[in-house]
Image (spheres, helix red, strand yellow):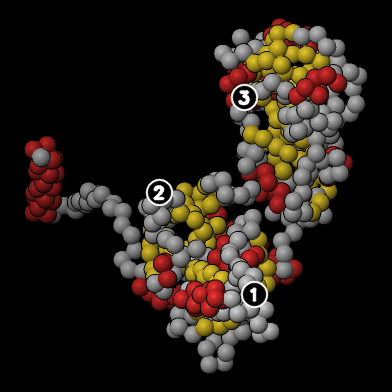
């Protein structure tokens, strides 16, 4: 406190001296300019969000979704098959009445299963005055009765135009009335939002109706591992159960996010909420509006991330980056374009690929049937391939391309903390290795104190490549490792296949 007081007093003394000098100069008839001292800039939020909230509130709606299912289809209990007139018949009739269910007999008095009704509440917003409403897919689920509740309490029955579970979006349509025209809000540019920018959320938390909360953008590009295209805006604006599907506004009243999830140990808001960016949502909504479905680009590869050890083993300039191809679909666009296992994709359609998590999102957002340039690093050298994108189908699985190789010798060798043997019929039978694994050497033991154990290589897995060269016998592994050591490499990259045929790259230090 004493130091602070001294500073204040010092500033006042300086100002007093300047004022005295100015006064003296004025007496002498001289012109003097006094420069004002800069004042500290204090950060503060908007004085009020009332005008903004009033402007957009009518476009925010509540969503009530009901699902009616037969109890026997959902694991519920059904009415026992009892002879007519049995003393227990009246007992069961009374039991179902007490539970608020209809009598479990149909019009012809035959036994039937009671039905069960579940309800969910969420939020949404109108994007077109003709009656288009955006919400989360998980808000409506498999509902067969959806009501959109406007800010004045009026209800409109909604139909589903399309859903996208991968991004967790749904597009609904209602029919507005002449007495109650709808107000819509536009999408804004989420790419312009920066951490620290003010945002406002409006929704239906805990079924309370339109509630306004405010905060800032805490982060962008968050991956919460909820799906293949995670790219969330994180905000500290209060978001709770029931806010799902509601809008996150910028200060111009534009929707820059759709509130989707929260991170909370208690189930309530702790200031960590996530919203789907408008840059991701808007193209999806357009496709749902046009096609009733989402049509995503498909490359036909299985990828994994590049860590520092893998980057060193691959000779990547500039460190860990890109998406490492661990599998190529035999019928996919990548195969036709000449992409190979071991290639690192560093640029796709002129967009840099910083990590493997970015590539699926970039590919999916690219129009189906478009020819794009893909830049890859192959054995330390950059190459560019032209790829004609296909269409991603739900449930599509990648397959690893491989060619038949001569049977490996059965001798056992120890290298990199691994005991290795040939891929013989005996080894294949012993470890139940699928026929899709055509070549490589089989791991029979892993030294628990080795780097290989740390990287979770398991007995029964098959090493297909060492340093991006195919191996067919344990001697090939030893030879390749020795060669890499002579080149001064600090690590070696192994392509490892599981017993089911799925492959991954593993970087092992060369001690």
Position of 495 relative to 23 (above/below):
above
Of tags 2 and 1, the one toward the viewer is: 1
Q: CA distance from mark 3 to mark 1?
A: 61 Å
Asked if marks 3 and 1 touch (Cβ < 8 Å), the reply is no
Q: Nearer the viewer, residue 79 or 29?
A: 79
How far from the left and from the top, in percent, is residue 170? 62, 66
How far from the left and from the top, in percent, is residue 108? 69, 84
**Residue to which mark 1 is pinned:** 83
Where, by quadrant of the figure, is residue 327 drawn?
top right
Q: State which quarter of the image contains the N terminus.
A: top left
Q: Earlier in the sequence, mark 2 or mark 1?
A: 1
Position of 385 relative to 86 (above/below):
above
Q: Earlier in the sequence, mark 3 or mark 1?
A: 1
The answer to whether residue 77 is left or right of residue 238 is: right
Asked if marks 2 and 1 touch (Cβ < 8 Å), the reply is no
Position of 326 relative to 506 (above/below):
below
**Residue to which mark 2 is pinned:** 265
């Amino acid at each position: 406190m004493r130091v602070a007081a001294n500073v204040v007093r010092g500033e006042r003394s300086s100002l007093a001296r300047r004022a005295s000098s100015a006064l003296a100069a004025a007496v002498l008839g001289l012109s003097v300019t006094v420069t004002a001292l800069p004042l500290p800039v204090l950060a503060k939020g908007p004085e009020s969000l009332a005008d903004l909230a009033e402007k957009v509130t009518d476009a925010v709606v509540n969503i009530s979704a009901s699902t009616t299912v037969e109890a026997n289809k959902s694991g519920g209990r059904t009415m026992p098959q009892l002879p007519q007139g049995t003393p227990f018949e009246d007992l069961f009739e009374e039991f179902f009445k007490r539970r608020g269910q209809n009598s479990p007999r149909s019009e012809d008095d035959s036994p039937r299963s009671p039905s069960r009704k579940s309800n969910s509440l969420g939020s949404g917003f109108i994007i077109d005055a003709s009656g288009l409403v955006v919400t989360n897919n998980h808000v409506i689920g498999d509902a067969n009765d959806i009501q959109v509740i406007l800010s004045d309490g009026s209800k409109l029955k909604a139909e589903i135009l399309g859903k996208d579970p991968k991004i967790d979006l749904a597009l609904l349509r209602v029919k507005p009335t002449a007495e109650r025209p709808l107000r819509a809000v536009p999408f804004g540019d989420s790419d312009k939002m920066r951490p620290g920018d003010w945002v406002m959320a409006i929704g239906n938390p805990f079924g309370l109706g339109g509630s306004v909360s405010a905060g800032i953008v805490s982060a962008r590009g968050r991956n919460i591992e909820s799906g293949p295209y995670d790219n969330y805006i994180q905000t500290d604006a209060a978001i709770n159960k029931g806010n799902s599907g509601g809008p996150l506004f910028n200060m111009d009243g534009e929707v820059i996010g759709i509130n989707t999830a929260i991170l909370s140990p208690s189930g309530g808001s702790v200031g960590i909420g996530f919203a789907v960016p408008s840059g991701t949502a808007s193209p999806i909504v357009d496709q749902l509006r046009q096609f009733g479905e989402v049509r995503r680009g498909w490359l036909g590869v299985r990828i994994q991330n590049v860590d520092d050890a893998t980057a060193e083993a691959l000779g990547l300039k500039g460190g860990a980056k890109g998406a490492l191809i661990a599998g190529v679909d035999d019928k996919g666009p990548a195969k036709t374009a000449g992409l190979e296992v071991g290639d690192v994709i560093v640029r796709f359609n002129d967009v840099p690929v910083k990590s493997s998590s970015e590539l699926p999102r970039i590919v999916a957002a690219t129009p189906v049937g478009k020819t794009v340039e893909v830049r890859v690093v192959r054995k330390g050298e950059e190459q560019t391939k032209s790829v004609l994108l296909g269409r991603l189908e739900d449930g599509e699985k990648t397959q690893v391309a491989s060619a038949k190789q001569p049977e490996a010798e059965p001798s056992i060798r120890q290298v990199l903390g691994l005991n290795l043997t040939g891929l013989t019929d005996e080894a294949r039978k012993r470890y139940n290795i699928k026929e899709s694994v055509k070549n490589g050497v089989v791991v029979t033991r892993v030294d628990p104190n080795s780097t290989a154990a740390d990287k979770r290589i398991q007995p029964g897995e098959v090493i297909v490549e060492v340093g991006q060269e195919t191996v067919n016998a344990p001697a090939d592994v030893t030879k390749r490792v020795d060669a890499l050591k002579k080149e001064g490499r600090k690590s070696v990259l192994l392509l490892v296949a599981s017993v089911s045929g799925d492959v991954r790259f593993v970087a092992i230090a060369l001690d």
